[in-house]
């Protein structure tokens, strides 16, 4: 009964004031971490230091829930915790779970940097972005029309091709390096198709970028930060 009375009381307050009330009730000062067990693709959520009755407001009544979820999804940073090549499956499951309206409220998402793979079938080794990771960027474009910030993590599981071609620049490796640059440009081209995107951040968990790669990334307007 107390929750119902609280809800009725809130509905008597102007909407702009209600939005300010939702902020301290629903927003915690940490990212929200999404994960799955890899088999069922059921999405799990880890929210550090969340209050015991964190989401109680969403269960008061439909109107308050419909208003408050905009704050919940729009004010948090959502981090996909999965260093495998199937992170796109987790992204798809999450977007399906929350539905198109809530996906439209997302503003800040963190994913793996798309994997750059070597095509070993070719006589001359070429590099390209894994198709499954391109699909992930396209999902964001199609399902997250309000996204303004995208962070992409570079770590040992997705940067091997970049590391091996970027750390040493010999004449024999120069063509592979050009392919690396082309692969990065492919990622940038996909990002430019996300009309709402204002900021792209690269977080490095596997050492600094090579000079050539850093210069190219800078030309794209991406922000580069060390891993946290």
Image (spheres, rainbow, N blue to C red):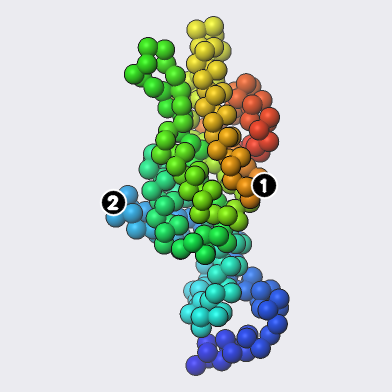
Q: Earlier in the sequence, mark 1 or mark 2?
A: 2
Q: Secondary structure at mark 1?
A: loop
Q: Secondary structure at mark 2?
A: loop
- Extreme residue in the top direction: 171
Kindly identify the residue that appears in the image at 42 percent across and 12 percent down.
Answer: 124
Tell me where residue 96 appears, x and y as whole percent: 42, 59
- Between circles 1 and 2, the one closer to the viewer is 1
Classify residue 6 by image quadrant: bottom right
> Does residue 136 appear anywhere in the picture?
yes
Residue 221's place in the image compared with 7, above or below, is above
Classify residue 225 by image quadrant: top right
Tell me where residue 183 appears, x and y as whole percent: 52, 27
Q: Where, quadrant-wise, is the C terminus in this rendering?
A: top right
Q: Residues within 10 Å of mark 1 (few under 14, many from 20)?
A: few
Which numbered disc covers residue 129? none
Q: Which residue is mark 1?
A: 198
Distance between the Cα atoms at labels 1 and 2?
Answer: 34 Å
> Are the two marked residues, 1 and 2, in contact with CB atoms closer than 8 angstroms?
no
Tell me where residue 11 appears, x and y as whole percent: 62, 86
Tell me where residue 208 appears, x and y as whole percent: 59, 29
Residue 221's place in the image compared with 104, above or below, is above
- Extreme residue in the left direction: 39
Kindly identify the residue that appears in the image at 61 percent across and 62 percent down.
Answer: 75
Q: Is residue 26 left or right of residue 132?
A: right
Q: Which residue is mark 2?
A: 39
> Does residue 204 appear anywhere in the picture?
no
């Amino acid at each position: 009964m107390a929750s119902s009375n609280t809800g009725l009381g809130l509905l008597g307050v102007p909407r702009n004031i209600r939005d300010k009330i939702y902020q301290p009730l629903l927003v915690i000062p940490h990212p929200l971490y999404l994960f799955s067990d890899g088999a069922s693709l059921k999405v799990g959520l880890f929210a550090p230091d969340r209050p015991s009755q964190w989401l109680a407001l969403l269960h008061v009544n439909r109107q308050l829930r419909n208003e408050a979820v905009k704050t919940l999804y729009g004010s948090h940073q959502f981090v996909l915790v999965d260093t495998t090549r199937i992170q796109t499956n987790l992204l798809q499951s999450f977007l399906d779970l929350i539905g198109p309206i809530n996906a439209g409220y997302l503003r800040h998402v963190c994913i793996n940097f798309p994997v750059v793979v070597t095509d070993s079938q070719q006589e001359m080794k070429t590099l390209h972005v894994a198709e499954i990771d391109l699909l992930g960027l396209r999902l964001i474009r199609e399902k997250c029309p309000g996204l303004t910030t995208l962070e992409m993590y570079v770590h040992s599981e997705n940067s091997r091709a970049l590391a091996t071609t970027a750390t040493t620049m010999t004449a024999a490796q120069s063509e592979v390096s050009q392919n690396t640059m082309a692969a990065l440009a492919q990622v940038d081209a996909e990002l430019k198709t996300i009309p709402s995107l204002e900021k792209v951040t690269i977080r490095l968990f596997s050492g600094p970028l090579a000079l050539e790669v850093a210069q190219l990334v800078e030309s794209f307007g991406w922000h580069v930060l060390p891993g946290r």
